[in-house]
Amino acid sequence: MRTFARRQSPPPADIITYRLNNQMMYVPTAESFDQAVTFARSAFESDLTGIDKSRISFSLNVLVNGKQSSVDISHGAWSTIMSHLVRYEIVDVHIQPEPRVSGPPPSYRSHSLTKKKQHSSSHPSSAGLATLLETEE
């Protein structure tokens, strides 16, 4: 009887590499996006001090049709993505720009509204029909 060797996937990575501004640091694999932010702040303390956690994001470099592309990692996909990384894989850390705060919204001139006679009916198109009939009179 012939048996086939089952191809086994490597175990999930226990250590990955964070890269920020051409500096790299080995970090444990984070179980959540928030924990990943904590690890990044610890690894790159001087660069990330004072940066709001909402501005820190992560991405992976992947090959798509022979071209290298950067793919952002969302909060919801974090644990799934981490379970497929190999040991020492590089995860890029990014600092997103601060949201621009603009002035107050534009003000609009108010127009006086004219009251129209409305015919009361339970049918939604009846009011439109009543208005049409009034204009014909």
Image: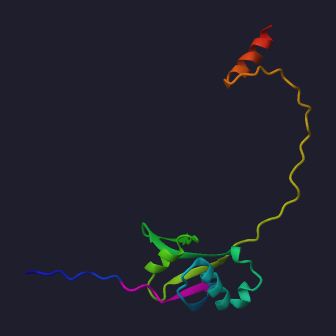
- Nearer to us in this view, 132 or 27: 132
| Place of residue 86 in the rendered image (x, y in percent of width and height, measured from the top left) | 44, 84
Residue at 89%, 43% in the rendered image? 108
> In the drawing, does residue 58 fall left or right of residue 98?
left
**Residue at the location (84% across, 23% down)?**
116
Quarter of the rendering occupied by the C terminus: top right
Residue 25, x across and y down, in percent: 59, 91
Residue 22 can be seen, yes or no: no
| Residue at figure coordinates x 55%, y 84% from the top left | 30
Please check the rendered image and state whether residue 12 is part of the magenta-colored stretch, yes or no. Answer: yes
The quarter holding residue 72 reads bottom right
115 relative position to 67: left or right: right
The answer to whether 113 is drawn above or below residue 61 in the figure is above
Which residues are drawn in magenta? 10-19
Query: Which of 65/54 is in front?
Result: 54
Q: Quadrant of the N terminus?
A: bottom left
Q: Give how far across and how far down residue 111 sits, in percent.
A: 91, 34
Residue 60, percent from left and from top: 53, 76
- Asked whether residue 52 is drawn in magenta, I would say no
What is the quadrant of residue 134 in the picture?
Answer: top right
Is 57 in front, or is 30?
A: 30
Q: Is residue 48 visible?
A: yes
Residue located 30% across and 83% down the image? 8
103 versus 42 height, above or below = above
Above or below 61: residue 133: above
